[in-house]
Amino acid sequence: MMDIDEILITALKMDASDIHLISGHAPMIRVHTKMTPLDGYPPIQPDEAQAMFEHMAKPEQRQRFSDVNDVDFSYAVPNLARFRVNVHSQRGSIGIALRSIKMDIPPLSALNLPEVISQLTYLPRGLVLVTGATGSGKSTTLAAMIEEMNQRYHSHVITLEDPIEYAFQSRKCVIEQRELGGDTPSFASGLRHVLRQDPDIILVGEMRDLETTASAITAAETGHLVLSTLHTNTAASTIERIVDMYPADQQNQIRAMLANTLQAVISQQLFKRIDQPGMVPALEILLANPAVRNLIREKRTFEIPNVIETNRAAGMQTLDNAISALYYNGMISKEDAIAKASSPEKLRRSLAA
């Protein structure tokens, strides 16, 4: 019988970001974006996949899987790493996907992020959004920001996560972490009650529906610093996604609320490095200055890229400018740069000039 902890330890030694355990396949790992089989392991039998799931999951998580054939939770190998786990049914047997999360929260200075990201941790209130596709490093960026505040402020931090990923230790801050399913039934439910828990800083794992989004914006309006994520690729599309969650007759009101509360949108993409092993992020950064707030109120979010371009001195940057800088610094390939650009043909011409 395969030992799940042994598989995870071996995968981490190979610097795997993801591990896939699927009945009928040998264990597969993703290393710097590429999928590869884990050497020395035979195909996983259905009873082995079932045993791995039962080893990692709590009774209530097993029950949820029995009810809906999908469940998310976290799992830790002591003194090594935590994992975000999804267990699902496929072709009548169990599939398990694990995303590795380091035990130690990396400092912002180690993440190749612009200095303006650190400056955002000094904000007293408002809404900061970190966006991007799954696996783009959103959770790591937010955890590093929270940890920087944890080292500096005597504040109360409450996180709402699905599942808990990085485990914080209260240093100067008092940090409470609430997990969906075990500690609160949903983001929206947790947010409805959070304002009575005397928080200064609130982390919402994802603004995935209207009720959660409305509650997060309300919390930011009432003087709290709220950090959250969306699965959007640009600052302009992030704002439009939020507005589009609301009925048409409420959209003018939400534009006004968003214009008043939004502080920044950070849109991330991860690239495989060519100068050394590892990954490096490219970021689009929007800071909500008076011009941006007016564009939000006046339904002119299509002009946001121009504002970003003309405010580079203030710390803003477009995604394509960030990608170009990574390419010219010898960190990423030309092919990757063009493939992930917002305007591939424009960037192709720029890099050829």
Image (spheres, grey):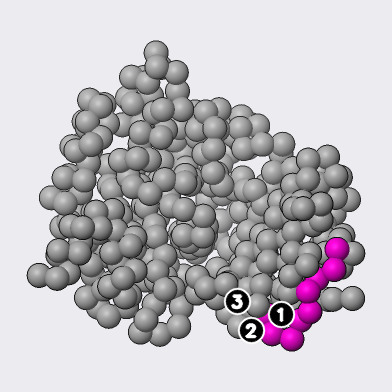
The answer to whether the residue labelled 1 contacts the one labelled 2, judged by CB atoms less than 8 Å apart, is: yes
> Residue farthest to the top?
249
| Amino acid type, callout 3 | Thr
Quadrant housing residue 291: top left
Residue tagged 2: 13
**Which-is-in-front pick, marks 2 and 3?**
3
Relative depth, front residue between 135 and 82 = 135
| Amino acid type, callout 1 | Ile
Would residue 345 be seen by someone viewing this image from the given angle? Answer: yes
Magenta stretch bounds: 38-46
Judge whether 128 appears above or below 216 on screen. Answer: below
Q: Is residue 295 left or right of residue 100?
A: left
Q: Position of residue 198 (x, y in %)?
A: 58, 38
Q: How many discs appear?
A: 3
Judge whether 114 appears above or below 41 on screen. Answer: above
Residue 36 is marked as 3
Considering the numbered disc 3 on the image, is that residue within a helix, a strand or a loop? strand
Q: Residue at x 67, y 52 (%)?
A: 163
